Image (cartoon, rainbow, N blue to C red):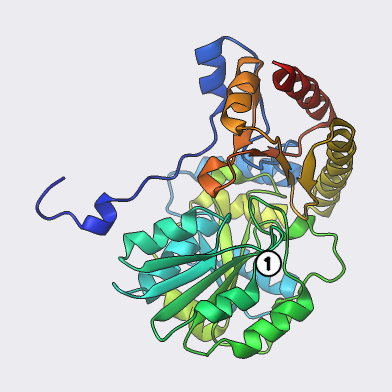
Amino acid sequence: MTPFAKDYVENIVPYVPGKPIEEVERELGVRAVKLASNENPLGPSPKALRAMRSAAKQAHLYPDGRCSVLKAKLANRFGLGEDQFIVGNGSNEIIELLARGFLREGDRVISSESSFLVYPLIAQTCGAAYTAVPMKDFRFDLRGILAQMDDRTRLIFIANPNNPTGSYVKANEVEGFLSQVPQEVLVCFDEAYIDFVEAGDFPNLLNYVRGERKNLILLRTFSKSYGLAGLRIGYGIASKQLSQYLEKVRQPFNVNRLAQIAAAAALGDGRFLRRTKRLVSDGKLYLYRQFTKMGLEFISSEANFVLVDLERPAEKVFQALLKRGMIIRPMAAYGLPNHIRVTVGKHGDLVKFIRVLKEALKG
């Protein structure tokens, strides 16, 4: 582009989000249903909505630069110190802070194939090498990650549950894995979908944070289960030392006032969270039954979406579904050209999805 551009930035292929409802309706003249971006079909938490309406009167004021109220509520929720949390403009910003704070040109980042596309993008912006370890049965291969480590490895990303497969690594696997990772290598467990987990052997990594493990950070978000994706607010949980270090590379006022207030209110909305989890659990069972009847293979998911194999190029099916007003996510960018990812929506929307999917597959 210019003589002063960085080659490794110039070569980045930007992240492509799911199509917005408004764009599809404008382009195709249809009423659209979006099951593409793992959003909460119930909308925001009602308590969060009331808090935002009240807080809008103070939109002329800068937000609390320390997110003090939200951190206090998070600390109370998890039994940790307020200084063990860092709040970001979505959990994506925490990923960026990790890269900004720890990665140098020539360092290595390790994760898995068919995982969150932001991980390689963030590594590339810093001139770091990115290694995607092949999955085993659509699951992170922790032994394979250990085998790839060398003295240049600085950061490991593990999405648990993983996006887009919905699979997870088990507690006993994590225990053995962490015991073999050197203290100078930072491990980030991205737990954006943890509120939807039902598996009894899912790891409770908060215990490691309580044990003051210095090279571990957990990421969580208000985008999914609390329905606040449009406000962009997430947080990291780590040792006091790690959290305070990341504060040094965080922009001031990085989280807006409405997002902070809404998130703090949403934390107290247990009824809404239970309703969301019930909808997702019931919706996944419906999709499992329908896919089984259709003879389609799918991955049992611990998240609020399901990955399904169409056994044919998914892009054509995606386009056919779009024309019928159904927005889903094809997975070619994740190395899965025959798969689509479907967000669990309201029952009526899932019924429509199955109907138009059958039509698209026939055509």
**Tally of marks:** 1
For label 1, the crowd category at 10 Å Cα-Cα, with few meaning under 14, some 14 to 19 and many 20 or more, is some
Is 43 left or right of 70, judged from the image as shown?
A: right
Q: Is residue 212 visible?
A: no
Q: Residue 359 in the image: x percent, y percent?
A: 75, 17
Is 356 left or right of 325, judged from the image as shown?
A: right
232 to 360, vertically: above or below: below
181 to 316, vertically: above or below: below
Q: Residue 138 in the image: x percent, y percent?
A: 69, 57
48 to 24, vertically: above or below: below
* Near-viewer residue (279 or 126): 126
Q: Quadrant of the N terminus?
A: top left
Q: Amino acid at mark 1?
A: Lys
Residue found at x 80% / y 59%: 197
32 to 83, vertically: above or below: above
Residue found at x 48% / y 60%: 119
Residue found at x 68% / y 79%: 80
Q: Residue 61 in the image: x percent, y percent?
A: 43, 50
* Near-viewer residue (265 or 221): 221
> Looking at the rendering, which quadrant does residue 296 occupy?
top right
> Outermost residue toward the front?
311
Residue found at x 76% / y 26%: 353
Is 247 left or right of 232, judged from the image as shown?
A: left
Secondary structure of the residue carrying numbered label 1: helix
Q: Residue 131 in the image: x percent, y percent?
A: 46, 67
> Looking at the rendering, which quadrant does residue 34 occupy?
top right
Q: Quadrant of the C terminus?
A: top right
Q: Is residue 250 visible?
A: yes
> Looking at the rendering, which quadrant does residue 327 occupy?
top right
Is 94 left or right of 305, judged from the image as shown?
A: left
For disc 1, the marked residue is 73
